[in-house]
Image (tube, grey):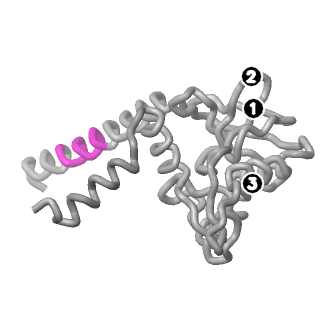
Amino acid sequence: MSAYRRHRRYRRAQDWILTACFILGLLFVANMLQGGGEQKVFRGPFHVIDGDTLAQMGTRLRLSGIDAPELDQTCRTVDDRPWPCGKAAREQLVDLVKDGDVECRGTEVDRYDRPLVICYRQNTNLNVQMVRTGFALSAGLLTYQREQLKAENEKRGIWAGRFQRPSQWRRERKLENQGVDFSNMLDGLKGVLSLQWL
């Protein structure tokens, strides 16, 4: 093998090693920025705030990978009647943690500095159960998607009727609190689209 080929192979190997080190460094920095690190363990009993939030001695814990309806959110039944799906989601989580033999674990925190946790009662993953029963949505691209599809196909919980995604519901409430009037915006949009102004 010529010296040129050896040098070229050496450079290629060096490039791969540097690339791998760079990617590992990025992953390490991302993990540090997300608050990853030492695993925190919380053992029940817990107070249930809503369908995806628990509290224990002043610390709020956010169930990782799921998004449940907000406490004052309403959904629609099949015959278009409103029902308090946010309260129903809370009651579902209350039922899952009521015996107190629950352990929650996590290494990350969310933007509100709440620990992101996965909770277990014996071998039952409560995050999975909330999605499986149709009282929470998967909050990730891959996390709990199979359970969500099953709940949707079987029309469980909020899937039994119509609902607004909790993230969208929160956005609209935030805009309303900031003084954005949706009815006037909608009327204005209808007027523009009707072309009566031409």
Q: Could you tell me residue 57's position as x and y percent?
A: 79, 23
Horizontal relation, residue 70 to residue 87: left or right: left
Looking at the image, which residue is at 81% across and 35% down? 47
The residue indicated by pointer 1 is: 55
Label 2 and label 1: CA atoms lie apart by 6 Å
Determine if residue 147 is in view. no
State if disc 1 and disc 2 touch (CB < 8 Å). yes
Q: Secondary structure at mark 3?
A: helix
Q: Amino acid at mark 3?
A: Ala
- Of 105 and 165, nearer the camera is 165
Q: Could you tell me residue 95's position as x and y percent?
A: 85, 51
Compared to residue 1, the image places residue 116 above or below, namely above
Segment colored magenta: 11-19
Q: Secondary structure at mark 2?
A: loop
The residue indicated by pointer 2 is: 58
Q: Amino acid at mark 2?
A: Gly
Who comes first in sequence, dot 3 or dot 2? 2
The residue indicated by pointer 3 is: 88
